[in-house]
Image (cartoon, rainbow, N blue to C red):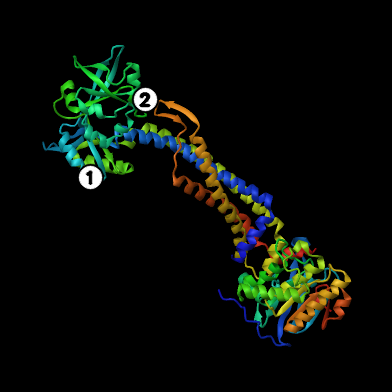
């Protein structure tokens, strides 16, 4: 152990009460930082997971067509210049197979699925509701969504695969229509009615989806909607969803279709979560500020009480930087212990919070408080505490180092 | 940055250890500014014990702090073992203090959270010339020589005033400095302990060929020193 660390440790343990106060503040600062981050980002992460698991990381929707405008050149020469005016979008994807083949060449792409969407009315023996059908090829759609995992009824997707007249319905819509698995429904589209049977009920985690969306076989959907070719959109899942923006921009350029990454698709909700994150960041910064003020207070007190010891050390050949180090070591010791205990405290409280009942069934579905477990929350909490506490400790440490030993000895002796 | 530290391992009795010339020092500011030292010159040789005596406020302690490089003069020169120190930076003066000078203060000035052994080892740990085992052995030996061999692991708070001052003497000798500066080392002690501490200080210093400069109000102590320099109003008389 270095002499400075040894001295720092003794100085600190001699001021147990002040040290425990600083330590408590550091533990609270680090712990509450972690808890706040875990709870704030917990809901955001869950929301993102829900939407990625349902609607994929991006969608290729409409074909882009450049439009041209002619203008007369100046000087009345009669010459015309063709100028790019803007982009016209043609709804839907006309050649989904070509698009899918092209998209599969992108390294980050995990799965691609063409989807045909259409508005319908669905009727059970009890009720009629408006809904949207999503025609899918299940083999493809499994790769771009978590539909299989979200089936809540026995048998999973097995019954859906058995027949083209099988449909999957969201939990909210099924409850409204009072449907159970194997029940019959009638779907009406474009003036034509067809009978289907319910092969499964899913819970996507989003109430908006669960109250409107009906999945059925793509071929059957084409027949029902009278759309023998094309698709409404192509849904894509990615190995690294956070790279969706970059990939979308690249695909848009290459494919000539509008490509919407999930960040753009859900930007309203994501901006709400971002605002919450900023708000919580301000709160947790206050926590750590309190911790740093406590450390400042403790060190300032130790400096005042240890001026005589500083003079002794200086008289023995300890340099100014040794004195600075001794006080910074004290802050570092409190920080080290505080970070460890704060991390444990944060983890324990985060775990406790995750057990708190909190039924939500709107934007997403959950029964308990959602928390996020990320090592980065701990890294951020500790890094913030280190920066703030060490900066706060620099002031008393430098003050201690600036003390002139002669002045101290003279003052003490008088 | 180079230091001015030179080994003090081969002291020769009679060598000049410390010299100052025409030292000036003012204390206070504005109307309260006092001319404390008015051109003091002084020298101390190895193996000699010097007493600086005089009434309170005459500048004895101020001179001692200047000689110990704890303070900076407003004018004049200080040499430690032939090296000019008065205009050196804090780093060089601190290094010289650690290597060449041992202090004994009136109020013991032990670090009370540390044991007697740790207090004596502290200057050695900073200088870093010895291994940890050798430091501990030397500290034990020094404490033994001041009669505290059985109390090495007592905290400063568990020692009497006389014992604390003996630990301070042992600590001052820890790095085998060429100069021992003592500011009223017996000022807070009873007669018995005063004699004990003074005897220790002078015996150990003479054994090691060190120059001892002490400030004292005690005429008996002053009489027993090799050289007595009375001061008045910032000057030797």
| Label whose residue precedes the other's in the sequence (2 or 1) | 1
Element under label 1? loop
| Left or right of A378, for residue A92 | left
Task: Report in which chain the residue with disc 2 lies.
Answer: A
The residue identified by callout 2 is A207
- Write down the residue under mark 1: A106
| In the image: residue A260, left or right of residue A371 | left
Where does the N terminus of chain A fall, quadrant-wise? bottom right
| A225 left or right of B46 in image | left
Where is residue A187? Give x, y as percent.
23, 17
| Chain label for disc 1 | A
Quadrant where the C terminus of chain A is found in the figure:
bottom right
The residue drawn where x is 42% and y is 29% is A366
Q: Residue furthest front?
A: A155
Q: Answer above or below: position of A272 versus B147.
A: above
Q: Position of residue A368 (x, y in %)?
A: 46, 31
Where A165 falls versus A265 (above or below)?
A: above
Q: Is residue A108 above or below residue B46?
A: above
Determine if marks 2 and 1 fall on one subunit: yes
Residue A158, located in which quarter of the rendered image?
top left
Residue B209 is situated, as x and y percent measured from the top left of the image, at: 73, 84
């Amino acid at each position: 152990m270095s002499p400075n660390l040894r001295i720092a440790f003794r100085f600190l343990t001699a001021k147990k009460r002040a040290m425990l106060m600083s330590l408590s503040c550091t533990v609270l600062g680090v712990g509450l930082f972690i808890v706040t981050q875990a709870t704030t980002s917990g809901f955001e992460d869950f929301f993102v997971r829900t939407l990625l698991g349902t609607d994929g990381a991006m969608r290729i929707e409409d074909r882009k067509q450049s439009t041209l405008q002619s203008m007369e050149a100046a000087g009345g020469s009669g010459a015309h210049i063709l100028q790019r005016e803007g982009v016209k979008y043609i709804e839907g994807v006309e050649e989904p197979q070509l698009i899918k083949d092209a998209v599969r060449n992108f390294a980050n792409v995990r799965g691609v699925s063409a989807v045909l969407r259409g508005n319908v009315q669905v009727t059970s023996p009890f009720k009629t509701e408006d809904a949207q059908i999503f025609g899918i090829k299940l083999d493809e759609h499994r790769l771009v969504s978590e539909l299989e995992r979200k089936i809540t009824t026995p048998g999973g997707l097995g019954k859906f695969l058995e027949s083209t007249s099988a449909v999957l319905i969201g939990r909210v819509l099924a409850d409204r229509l009072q449907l159970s698995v194997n029940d019959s429904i009638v779907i009406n589209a474009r003036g034509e009615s067809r009978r289907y049977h319910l092969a499964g009920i899913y819970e996507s985690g989003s109430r908006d989806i669960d109250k409107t969306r009906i999945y059925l076989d793509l071929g059957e959907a084409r027949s029902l909607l009278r759309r023998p070719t094309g698709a409404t959109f192509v849904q894509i899942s990615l190995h690294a969803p956070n790279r969706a923006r970059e990939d979308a921009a690249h695909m848009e350029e290459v494919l000539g279709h509008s490509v919407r990454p999930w960040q753009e698709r859900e930007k309203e909700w994501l901006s709400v979560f971002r605002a919450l994150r900023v708000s919580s960041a301000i709160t947790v910064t206050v926590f750590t500020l309190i911790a740093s003020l406590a450390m400042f207070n403790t060190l300032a007190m130790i400096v005042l009480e240890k001026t005589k010891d500083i003079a002794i050390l200086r008289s023995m050949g300890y340099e100014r930087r040794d004195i600075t180090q001794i006080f910074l070591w004290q802050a570092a010791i409190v920080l080290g212990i505080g970070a460890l205990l704060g991390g444990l405290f944060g983890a324990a409280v985060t775990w406790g919070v995750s057990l708190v009942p909190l039924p939500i069934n709107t934007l997403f579905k959950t029964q308990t408080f959602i928390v996020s477990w990320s090592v980065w929350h701990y890294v951020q909490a500790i890094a913030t505490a280190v920066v703030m506490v060490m900066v706060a400790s620099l002031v008393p440490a430098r003050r201690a180092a600036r003390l002139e030993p002669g002045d101290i000895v003279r003052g003490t002796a008088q | 940055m180079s230091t001015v530290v030179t080994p003090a391992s081969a002291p020769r009795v009679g060598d000049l250890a410390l010299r100052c010339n025409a030292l000036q020092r003012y204390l206070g500011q504005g109307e309260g500014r006092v001319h404390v030292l008015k051109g003091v010159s002084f020298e101390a040789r190895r193996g000699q014990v010097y007493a600086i005596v005089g009434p309170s406020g005459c500048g004895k302690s101020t001179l001692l702090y200047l000689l110990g490089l704890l303070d900076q003069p407003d004018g004049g020169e200080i040499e430690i073992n032939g090296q000019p120190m008065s205009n050196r930076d804090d780093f060089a003066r601190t290094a010289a203090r650690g290597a060449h000078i041992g202090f004994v203060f009136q109020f013991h000035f032990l670090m009370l959270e540390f044991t007697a052994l740790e207090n004596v080892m502290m200057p050695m740990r900073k200088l870093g010339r010895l291994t940890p085992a050798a430091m501990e052995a030397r500290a034990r030996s020094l404490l033994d020589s001041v009669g505290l061999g059985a109390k090495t692991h007592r905290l400063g708070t568990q020692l009497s005033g006389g014992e604390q001052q003996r630990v301070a003497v042992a600590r001052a000798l820890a790095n085998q400095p060429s100069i021992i500066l003592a500011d009223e080392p017996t000022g807070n002690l009873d007669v018995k302990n005063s004699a004990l501490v003074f005897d220790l200080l002078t015996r150990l210093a003479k054994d090691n060929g060190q120059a001892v400069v002490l400030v004292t109000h005690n005429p008996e102590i002053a009489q027993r020193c090799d050289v007595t320099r009375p001061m008045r109003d910032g000057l030797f008389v």
